[in-house]
Image (cartoon, helix red, strand yellow):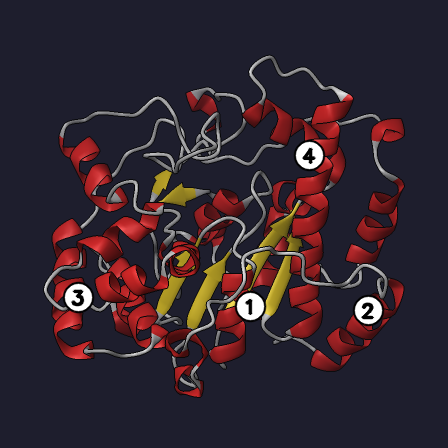
Amino acid sequence: MINMMNVLDKIGKFKELNSDYLTFYHELRMPQNEFFSSKENRDDNTQMLMISSPSRMGNHLLISILDNHPELPRIPGEDGFLSFSFFQANYDLKRYLEYVRDQHDANYMKRLSTNLFFDKWANLKQCYLKNNVPEKYSGVNIVDRPADIDFQDTIYDVNYAAYSDALNASLNTVGSGLFSDYLNLYANALLQLDYDYSPRATRFDGFFSYSGMRSQARWVLEHYEQARLVTSLRPFDSYAISHIKSRSKNNEITDEWIQNAWEHWYHKVIDYFYLKAAYPEKVCLVSFDDLTGQTKKVAKGICRFLDVGYSKSMLTPSVFGIPVKGNASTARRDSVRGTFYNSSHKLEKGRIPEDYFHLWESFDLVKTI
């Protein structure tokens, strides 16, 4: 169990040190409609687990570490239903509400997993049946649409029929409910993608993961008393290299690219710092370098936060039990499957903004270990 007195003392020091930094930068606002804002969205019972980190900071690594834990549900990768519900509702609220509340067709809800580009889990099922392994994977040279697969060179079977049936059955009963009703029914359906899913064996009722969810995570933390968020943050010196490699065609580390990376790092990290300060008992922050270098120690810290026992399975990153390579910014050999690794290539200290050093030093006050 977490010592909350110690945590709150550190949070107080953290807020004091960062009083000129802590604000919420995310430009995506919470949709201004009763569907989202009604107090009836309050949920004191559903145990909702979220994993969300800024891109290139270990979100997939966290998924793969928790994958085989016997007390936690499994998800087949990142799903954008929660993330893109906010995006689409802000873009065209009337259309969003009409399609989500359609009691005869769950196809719109399925496509929200990729911001309406395609049905991600139907595609993964077809890749598995046809033994077709897509070349591109999440976060690598794909910036305008979600990737077909989450982990390099890795496809696996999902129980798409159970997922689809669960969505359709729930839509026939929920009627014109509020967002929490639809979030809960989708979370339940998502867990059905695991052929081995058993609700009685798991600590949480729902499990969402998607990179960069800040407004969305904030909404869940505000409305769900039992919600928990786990986030990995990466030091800027290695993040900048990964960010540039995943986006730049020639991998040239120019001042312009460094500034682009800094804007991504600064605003997103500050948002997660804000969430930790606002919901200290609900948010777990870990360091990407600690995840790869002190995996067992960090894994035990995450387990204490989630109130589950430690499992040795966390030392082998996997998805649905299959060891994975991760989604590094450059392709990796098969020999790294099921292992932890980190790039030794780091940005020179003289090219790093001064604000970074203060922020990263203060991170020690609020991270899990």
Which percent across, then down, holds residue 82? 40, 60
Label 4 or label 3, whichever lies nearer to me, is 3
Real-space Cα separation, disc 2 to disc 4, in angstroms:
25 Å
User: Could you say which quadrant of the image residue 299 lies in?
Assistant: bottom right
Q: Percent x, y for residue 220?
A: 48, 71
Q: Residue at x 36, y 51 (%)?
A: 79
Lower position in the chain sequence, tag 4 or tag 1: 1
> Element type at marker 3?
loop
Q: CA distance from mark 4 to mark 3?
A: 41 Å
Q: Does label 1 or label 3 sit earlier along the sequence? A: 3
Is residue 257 left or right of 212 when viewed as pictured? Answer: right
Q: Residue 6: percent from the left, percent from the top?
A: 77, 76
User: Which residue position holds label 3?
Assistant: 102
Give the mark, 2 or 1, whose residue is nearer the N terminus: 2
Label 2 – label 1 distance at C-alpha? 18 Å
Q: Which residue is mark 2?
A: 15
